[in-house]
Image (cartoon, rainbow, N blue to C red):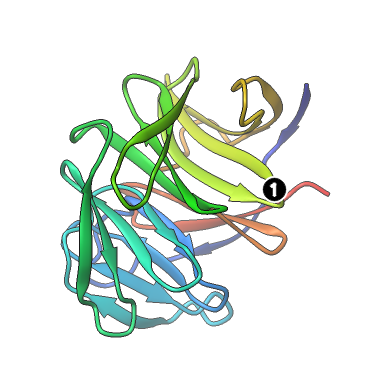
Amino acid sequence: MKRTAADIVREYGPFPDAPAVHGVAFDGARVWFASGDRLNAFDPASGETVRTIDVAADAGTAFDGRHLFQIAEDGIRKIDPETGRVLATIPAPGGGGDSGLAWAEGTLWVGQYRERRIHQVDPETGAVLRTLQSDRFVTGVTWIDGDLWHATWEAEQSDLRRIDPETGAVRERIDMPPGIAVTGLEAGGDTFFCGGGSSGKVRAVRRPA
């Protein structure tokens, strides 16, 4: 297994009226993050907030190329990012214990925090298609270039893990500095955007070549 230390290249925030970061998504131009009672979007070049949507947002966030998906309590909401309208809601597999969300090739991947699980979910019905087991608390999930990554947090230590989407075996690991939690994970270009929980920050970590 390849193992490296995280290279944090930039920090964004804290942002006004957004005391915590619970989930992160990238739509190709804007970085979205969940802050409890709303979704926020900022320009990754300037770091300035460019859009907010008033919607419950207390865990993972994902973008499918057209819509945002947002975990709130025990459901996953499908949201039009331009109007802010909630278009549909499906049940979250963890029933309120869900922690991360990613879109990948027509399905959703959902982290289940304390159970240390990652579920592949049908985005239309919420049916669980597959479940992978981790050995640490799952705090974020992302899919990039055919690879599934997830973030962990346990014993004051976070890491980012590239895992086999069939078996859950860990193929690569990036260790965050001690005490820096990752609460939400999204890949964009050569960067991972990592939610910083109660710090109110989003950190950009260089993706390995």
Task: Give the quadrant of residue 122.
Answer: top left
Q: Nearer the viewer, residue 38 or 109?
A: 109
Would residue 42 be found to the left or right of residue 205 on screen? left
* Residue that badge 1 annotates: 7
* Residue at (34, 28) in percent of width and height: 113
Q: Position of residue 158 (x, y in %)?
A: 51, 31
Above or below residue 206? Residue 29 is: below
Above or below residue 61? Residue 155 is: above
Above or below residue 177? Residue 3 is: above
Would residue 34 be found to the left or right of residue 185 on screen? left
Q: What amino acid type is highlighted by mark number 1?
A: Asp
Q: Nearer the viewer, residue 13 or 126?
A: 126
Label 1: few (<14), some (14–19) or many (≥20) C-alpha neighbours in 10 Å = some
Task: Give the quadrant of residue 112.
Answer: top left
Q: Position of residue 205 (x, y in %)?
A: 63, 52
Residue 181 appearing in the image: no
Q: Position of residue 43 (x, y in %)?
A: 49, 79
Secondary structure state at the residue bearing disc 1: loop
The quadrant of the rendering that contains the N terminus is top right
Above or below residue 46? Residue 123 is: above
- Residue lying farthest top? 135
Q: Nearer the viewer, residue 40 or 168?
A: 168
* Residue at (20, 69) in percent of width and height: 86
Residue 174 appearing in the image: yes
Task: Give the quadrant of residue 153.
Answer: top left
Q: Position of residue 46 (x, y in %)?
A: 53, 82
